[in-house]
Image: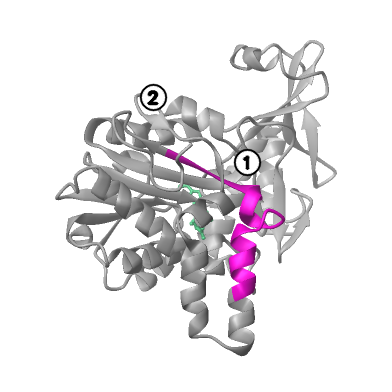
Amino acid sequence: MTALRQILLRRIAATGPITIADYMADCLLHPEHGYYATRDPFGTAGDFTTAPEISQMFGELVGLCLAQAWLDQGAPAVFTLAELGPGRGTLMADALRAARAVPGFHDAARVHLVEASPVLRARQRQALAETPVTWCDSAADLPDAPLLLVANEFFDALPIRQFVRDPAGWRERQVAARDGALLLGLSAPAPIAALDHRLADTRPGEVVETCAPAGPIMQQVAERIARHGGAALVIDYGGWRSRGDTLQALRGHAPEDILAHPGEADLTAHVDFEALAGAATGIAHTAMTPQGVFLERLGITGRAQTLARGLAGPALDSHVAAHRRLTHPDEMGSLFQVVGFHPNSTPPPPGLER
Ligand code: SAH
């Protein structure tokens, strides 16, 4: 039995069932046994892969999008270039390389990475060896300055709670224990004022998810953009409103039961973009735009053709497959969505115009 399962069983025996959020937080970020805290999970040998790991084009276009937003806002002499949950640092490295073509951008950028995992911080240091980087524990530590920020597959890793609609209110899904095994249970039903607004669009038996940390993080980002200018791109899978049970575990590129391997599987849930937009007070947000549409508008096809010229054989095949994977509606193109955030007085970041 894994160490984290033992810890969870002992904790539940001592203090009772825990919320899905507590389970997720321990599985992902327990300092000794958490999934992200102990490993680099990306790539074909890992558990899952992400857009910046699929092709350099993703980070390049994100970098140019942010650079254009910087130009559109008068090219402030000093600004924070930040990423939430940068993984291996690939996106930021590709973004910086592409934005080198924009005069003044590099001199003005102060790179800040918000990352909880020491293992991944070390990977990011390698990927960005030539760039001065400041690591932050939370978005609250970002400087009080203009902010250009990207978050790709960050919000889906934050702990969620799940509530099942019941004739008598809501029952929270919990992780309980019986005979040395973890199992899912439900709390007693009770009304929850914070979910009153979901009574109109749900029926008994339906699941609603909430993500407590997401709002305050978005608020920290929005405050800086409202005060000093800038823009944020949030890219993730999800929808405009949380619907149903979206919690999933992924290990070795295959889905599995969320309780099967605590701390050894990636756990994610769909992002509720409406909740993020609601937390971004004082700034504007763009329409939720499919990743494929966003990347096409930014010129991914032209970039793909340029890169293809230098390739042949299997390298060319995998480049063509990567382009398709990022943009095609049957692949990541419409599963992933992009929402941009910007000051009310400035144009939306390119690619996200209505
Ligand atoms: N953006 C990267 C990685 C996505 S995986 C990519 O697209 O490849 C999620 C990332 O968020 C990891 O780097 C993980 O360590 C980090 N992370 C998860 N929860 C976090 C938290 N609460 N605070 C800071 N970083 C977190």
Q: Residues within 10 Å of mark 2 (few under 14, many from 20)?
A: some
In this rendering, the answer to whether 236 lies above or below 203 is below
Which numbered circle lies on residue 267? none
Which numbered circle lies on residue 238? 1
In this rendering, the answer to whether 284 lies above or below 178 is above
Residue assigned mark 2: 281
Residue 49 is covered by the magenta coloring: no
Residue 213 visible to the viewer: no
In this rendering, the answer to whether 230 lies above or below 211 is below
Cβ atoms at labels 1 and 2 below 8 Å apart: no
Residue 264, position as x, y percentages in the image: 66, 59
The residue drawn where x is 76% and y is 56% is: 255
The residue drawn where x is 69% and y is 37% is: 12
Of 244 and 94, nearer the camera is 94
Tag 2: amino acid: Thr
The residue drawn where x is 79% and y is 51% is: 257
